[in-house]
Image (cartoon, helix red, strand yellow):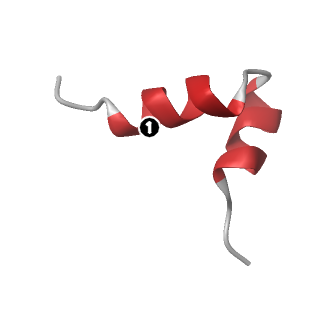
Amino acid sequence: MSITIRDVAKLAGVSVSTASLALNDRDY
């Protein structure tokens, strides 16, 4: 069972775009 960006967004209570940015912006 894989977790999608939508699952992450739902769990975090944020929008899909916000969750995507949070996951992809890990340069720090």
Q: Where is residue 2 in the image (x, y as percent from the top left)?
A: 67, 72
Q: Which residue ends up furthest to the left in the rendered image?
A: 28
Q: Report whether 23 appears left or right of 3.
A: left
Provide the secondary structure element on which disc 1 rests. helix
Q: Report whether 5 appears left or right of 28.
A: right
Provide the residue designation for mark 1: 23
Q: Where is residue 9 in the image (x, y as percent from the top left)?
A: 72, 35
Image quadrant holding the C terminus, namely top left
> Is 24 rendered above or below residue 2?
above
Q: Which residue is drawn at 73% across and 21% down?
A: 14
Q: Which residue is drawn at 79% across and 35% down?
A: 11
| Image-quadrant location for residue 17 | top right
| Image-quadrant location for residue 19 | top right
Q: Where is residue 12 in the image (x, y as percent from the top left)?
A: 73, 27
Q: Mark 1 packing: few (<14 Cα in 10 Å), some, or many (20+)?
A: few
Q: Which residue ends up furthest to the bottom in the rendered image?
A: 1
